[in-house]
Image (tube, rainbow, N blue to C red):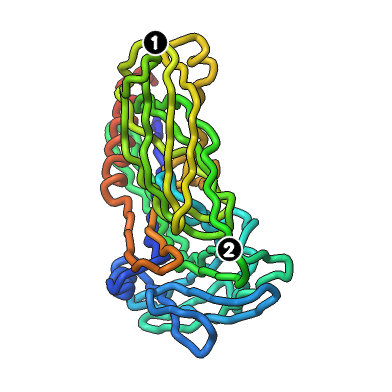
Amino acid sequence: MRSSTLVSILIVSYLIFSFPTNASSQALGDEQGFAMSAVQASDPAVTASGYFIYKVQSSASVTGSVLLKNPGNNDITIELAAVDAITAQTGGSAFETADHKTKAAGTWLKFAASSVTLTAGTQKVVDFSVVVPASAKPGQYLAGISAYAPSIPATAVVNQGGSEMGANVTVQTRYVIGVQVDVGGAWIPSLKIVSVALVQQPSGPFIGVRMKNDGDTLFKSSGTFVLSDAGGKRILEQPIQVGTFIPGTEITYPVKWSGELAAGTYKVEVVLDYGASKQATYTSELEIGTEKAVQNSAVAPQQPGTIGGAGDNGNAEGSLSVQSPATTEAQEGSSMWVWTLGGLSVLLLAAAALLVRRRKSQAPEKVL
């Protein structure tokens, strides 16, 4: 009698071109099967940094184009979708997955074609429009154009003693180009520090500083986190550096902590500078190692920048957000971060093989 064990793993690999440098997107595209880039046209968009920036008023309708290339030897179908921008756990722009329903600026994007098939060695320009609603208030908005080519699962099966064991690995590559829309008017940056709490994670505890960009502009912030005992002695002092914060989003910033403090009540002070000359402050008490601390401690919600299942930035397949530095009001510069899962895929395959081996060793022998 033959038994069969199959471990299925999905690896989602993202190449984010939200704020790219002069690095060649074509070169990256060649490695991944296709390439996408922003097209400079006669529309009002600025694309010098590799992504789109529109300076408009509410009720405006503008257009843009992306170039899709298939440098390979096989035909390929590329799916396009609008995605909302979110903020990674320590700041920086990230984007929802394509199957996540758009609720913010992503709803403003419309494509001439949502699916494009390219034969080997060909390319095509796809147009899109950005329709800013009349209700849009002055401020900065960020969305993204997501492109991916559905992958065919590759299965490896090993026959050992009449049993079939193997792993099914699917690699999904996605590209995202940012679309920044600056709606004219009076902008008011605002950063609110909501709370500070102990957060228990499998990797160990940390202190989470929950904060929200409740203003209407993109900004970065920096400052300090100070923890003092009842006598006023500073026990822990750490700098905080938050990358670009997307308006209307919130994060739980992790402050490293060894977990080695005497039980008691401590004073927390957080000071963050942001914008041109604004400052957010927070002062409170933090219970550590007491019954009250255990009651108040909670697992932080899944934050962009982590891999996981369904959640704020996930789906049933698993998800990955890529932190990418965004520009401030002065457009400080640009850079591109490419996050791939090559190393993780090796670890997952090794884990799958170990799981299969363990299951086989634990299975009782069958006598026919």
Among the two numbered marks 2 and 1 on one chain, the one whose residue lies closer to the N terminus? 2
Q: Are marks 2 and 1 in contact (CB under 8 Å)?
A: no
Image disc number at residue 263 = 1
Is 267 rendered above or below residue 19? above
Q: Where is the N terminus found, in terms of image quarters?
A: top left
Disc 2 marks which residue? 187
Give the amino acid type for the residue marked by disc 1 in the picture. Ala
Viewer-side label of 2, 1 = 2
Callout 1: few (<14), some (14-19), or many (20+) C-alpha neighbours within 10 Å? few
In the picture, the quarter occupied by the C terminus is: top left
Query: Which x, y percent locates residue 275?
Result: 46, 56
Residue 112 spot, x, y in % from top left:
60, 79
Residue placed most toward the observer, 352 or 331: 331
Tell me if 159 is positioned left or right of 61 in this view. Answer: left
Callout 2: few (<14), some (14-19), or many (20+) C-alpha neighbours within 10 Å?
some
Left/right placement of residue 139 relative to residue 121 reads right
Inter-mark Cα distance, 2 to 1? 45 Å
Report if residue 263 is visible in the image: yes
> What secondary structure is found at the residue carrying circle 1?
loop
Amino acid beneath label 2:
Trp
Between residue 127 and residue 190, name the one nearer to us.
Answer: 190
Residue at 39%, 36% (x, y): give it. 254
From the viewer's side, name the closer residue of 222 and 10.
222
At x 39%, y 46%, the residue is 168
x and y, in percent, of residue 277 in the image: 45, 55
Q: What kind of element bears circle 2?
A: loop
